[in-house]
Amino acid sequence: MIVGIDLGTTNSLVGVYDAGFVTLIADEAGQRLTPSVVYYPESGAPLVGRPASRMRAIHPESTVFSVKRFMGRRGGEEVSGIPYRVAGSAGSPLQIAIGDRRLSPEEVSAAILGKLKADAERALGVEITKAVVTVPAYFNDAQRSATKRAGELAGLEVVRILNEPTAAALAYGLDRLSEKTKVAVYDLGGGTFDVSILELTGGVFQVLSTNGNTRLGGDDIDAALVRHLEEACGFQAPDPAARARLLEAAVEAKHRLSDLEETVVSIPFLESGVSREVVLKRADLEKVALPFVEKTRAHCLRALADAGLEVAAIQELILVGGSTRMPLVRSYAGGLFGRTPNCSRNPDEAVAEGAALQAAILDGTLSQVVLLDITPLSLGIETFGGLMNVILPRNTTIPCKAGEMFTNAVAGQSSMLIRVLQGERELARDNWELGRFEIPFQALPKGQARVGVQFEIDANGILAVLARDTATGLEQVVQMTSAVEVSDEAVEKMLEDALENAFDDMNARVFTEAKLKAQEMLPSVTKALAVAGDRLDDFERSRIEACVDEVKKALEVEAAQQLKRAVANLDESTQTLAALVMEIAMQGAGPRRGG
Ligand code: AMP
């Protein structure tokens, strides 16, 4: 039996498909939502879930929450909004520091997964060793790999990593498989926002596009509400324990305001014996929350544009994630997509339901559905002149495989550095490096070595890169598991930057490509003129010389379009010269061949 797990930033759930429907499993206390919180006492086993949540106020520095934000991340990045410490120097894997202990984010996640596994085993009466685990669509390779490792640490083989919006669509769409529908999944959770556009046709789900922000969610609203309580309502929290209580009160008030128009926030003995109380209106909360909710707009528009769809083409809007319980979020998303959102499923549970359905598809219990996911960002390698050469374009359906042939830039070169890049920018240096390795090959004259590079993404979204020297058959396969050394904001910034710099980037590419061509042509034109220049008439000769000057000038002033034109002119003006050189060479070769 394979279970489906929604390993959330704030809450996690485990579900299983049995006898025709999904059951989400409750723990001993009868709760289905397990807070993704782990408390590490000085000695003894960690506490997970609700009991750990209660320790958040008392031992904030030993209680880890929102660990999902740190999965697959490296040290050295700024971390804010958490009372526990993270350690790890720039470049090395990030660790969570509890007293003298150092824990990897995987270990903390494994504690949560371990509890879900135990709950499932108790409820089902069988040992559970396999799971489908969901991740945000924006998780990169390192984050997906870390999620798999967390499963292994908990004694679970992660048989499939599934994108959360895809899981949600599956939960909503299973009873409507015969229809052809375009669906937008708007998922605003505690720490992440994802929007995906999917197409459902004849039992096949295809993700047309995804977009999102890995640092946007209810947590931001909570922090802003805490600030509001401090600044506008005079609440003061002098120490970490008081701050934790203030945060807890803010979150609870936020939740109540999803149903009520106003509520009382009251914290007894918040600071040195002084109690605080204030009436908070839904409108107050909405004012605080709106700037964050508005941030989802650009992502939705981009997802639509990437899918090549007008808003009117969307036939169904699905809301997922706890934060979509807020009336403000519902009306905002509804306004964006011009339709009433479908909230027929519990927004906290749709992803776990989908994961359980995917588990059932994998173990054969459910057979009529096929899931197709996509790559959120382009993948490629660096080529001559520092350019990004895309091998798998963004939004390619996975699993997928694609390859290209590369050659040597200089004669006698005997190895090639493969830099694996992810991103949308034209210049390699603006993209992220996922990894690098050297592939040796037989030294040959310039442009004659043949190195095949193949990218393969498996069903879990994990990338393996293969490079092969076609002459010797020597090959190397490298799985990309190292963390990307950029902050998560950079993930969402990538698309923005690519758009913003599209013009400059394209110019840089045009210039580099034209420059490479010019550098190849100029010496060969000089050589050709020496060999066959005297057979040209004056007009043709001076035309070539003028073109050469034009190329040199454009190179000097680094004018991309001018250089491109100049190179094309030079190419055109040397046609006769090239033919003459060829003729001379043939004449030279003729007698030798004959004799
Ligand atoms: P998720 O990451 O999907 O589990 O969503 C968790 C987020 O949803 C947290 O920021 C919660 O504060 C928020 N949330 C849960 N219930 C509600 C509610 N009733 N009203 C507003 N926000 C909620």
Image (tube, grey):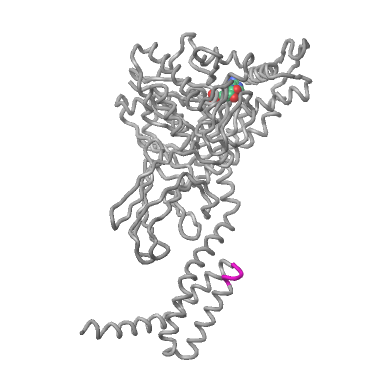
Residue beneath the point at 39% across and 11% down: 122
Q: Position of residue 419 (x, y in %)?
A: 45, 50
Residue beneath the point at 45% across and 54% down: 389
Q: Position of residue 584 (x, y in %)?
A: 34, 85
Q: Residue furthest front?
A: 100
Q: Nearer the viewer, residue 536 or 203?
A: 536
Name above or below for residue 174 compared with residue 235.
below
Q: Main secondary structure of the magenta part?
A: helix
For the question of whether residue 325 can be seen, the reply is no
> Bounds of the magenta span?
554-558
Q: Nearer the viewer, residue 499 or 55?
A: 55
Name above or below for residue 207 compared with residue 240.
below
Q: Quadrant of residue 99?
A: top right
Q: Nearer the viewer, residue 263 or 152?
A: 152
Name above or below for residue 282 compared with residue 480.
above
Q: Quadrant of residue 158?
A: top left
Residue beneath the point at 36% across and 33% down: 178
In reply to whether residue 557 is colored magenta, the answer given is yes
For the question of whether residue 407 can be seen, the reply is yes
Residue beneath the point at 30% across and 85% down: 587
On the picture, is 461 further left or further right than 94?
left
Name above or below for residue 560 compared with residue 287.
below
Quarter of the image that includes the N terminus: top left
Q: Nearer the viewer, residue 49 or 436?
A: 436
Q: Position of residue 172 (x, y in %)?
A: 44, 28
On the picture, is 99 further left or further right than 474?
right
Q: Quadrant of residue 585?
A: bottom left
Q: Residue furthest left?
A: 595
Q: Quadrant of ligand 1?
A: top right
In reply to whether residue 410 is colored magenta, the answer given is no
Quarter of the image that includes the C terminus: bottom left
